Image (spheres, grey):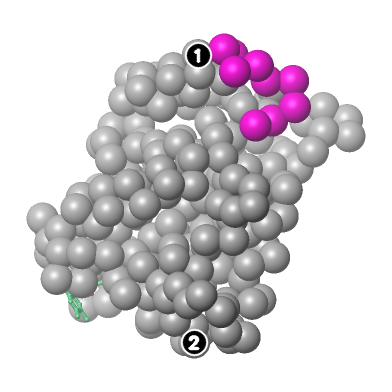
Amino acid sequence: MKTGLTRRNFVGSTAAAAFAGSIAAVAPARAASPGGASLKILGISCSPRQGMTTARAVQAALEAAKTVDPRIGVELIDLGGLRFSGYSPTPPTDDFSAILPKLQDPAVAGLVIGSPSYFRGLSALCKAFIERCAPLREPKMLLDGKPVGVIATGAFRNGGQELVIEQIQVAMLCFGMLPVGGRPPAFEGGTVVSTKDSIENDELGLTTARNTGLRVADLAVRLAR
Ligand SMILES: Cc1cc2nc3c(=O)[nH]c(=O)nc-3n(C[C@H](O)[C@H](O)[C@H](O)COP(=O)(O)O)c2cc1C
């Protein structure tokens, strides 16, 4: 929990932010207080295909997140092409070793996680990623009280994107994270349709991705007050 934020304030502010999300406007950008901590929003693309539609949708969310407050910095972690497996009692040395420190950075103020819909479920890569995040729970809940927005891509409208979003949101509850949707029409998160590996014509889907990024950033800024 952030310094200076009482439990009561925390519950009140996060409940207002998370559950009134569908009607509340995104707060206007606030000037950075001198010496104020930077707020890092990490985007995680969980498609095995590097730089493809999921990565681009997450990037769109991060670009939107950046506009909320000058203190916000963003970074895309594209898992495409990386080699790591799911949880193991003895964590292997693999490509996840380079990712873990980025997630452990105390400046991390929120996450945007993107996954393709694979047979109406999250990708195996996304599942492996979440399992390997176990060190972020123990010995300390490092992501506790931080917002997470989720984006799912699929080749079809109604291709399981909302199911994917819910699977990831539920998993991130185990880390104490606060799942957020976005301003309408991003009720649950980003729901993006890729057509021939392009999302550029899915204006509605890109709007949901951007609105999800805005919501994550908005809540991160509110919690930092
Ligand atoms: C194994 C597999 C299963 C898929 N299942 C679905 C699905 O259930 N629903 C859907 O809309 N798209 C499905 N797709 C399409 C992908 O979700 C879609 O192409 C997505 O945009 C890929 O993300 P990427 O471009 O980041 O790799 C599937 C693709 C693969 C390879």
Q: Is residue 48 above or below residue 22?
A: below
Q: Is residue 209 above or below residue 119?
A: above
Examine the structure image and report whether residue 3 is included in the region drawn in magenta: yes
Question: Can residue 205 be seen here?
Answer: no
Say which mark, if any, is on residue 83.
2
Q: Is residue 124 above or below residue 193?
A: below
Identify which residue, 105 or 32, lies in the foreground.
Answer: 105
Residue at the (15%, 64%) spot, across then down: 120
**Extreme front residue here?**
89
The part of the chain drawn in magenta is 1-9
Residue that label 1 marks:
12
Query: Which x, y percent locates residue 202?
Result: 25, 57
Question: Quadrant of the rendered structure where residue 179 is?
Answer: top left
Residue at the (63%, 67%) spot, across then down: 100
| First along the sequence among labels 1 and 2 | 1
C-alpha gap between disc 1 and disc 2: 41 Å
Query: In what quadrant of the picture does the C terminus appear?
Result: top right
Query: Which x, y percent locates residue 89?
Result: 51, 75
Question: Can residue 137 be seen here?
Answer: yes
**Extreme right residue here?**
35
Q: Which secondary structure lies at badge 1?
A: helix
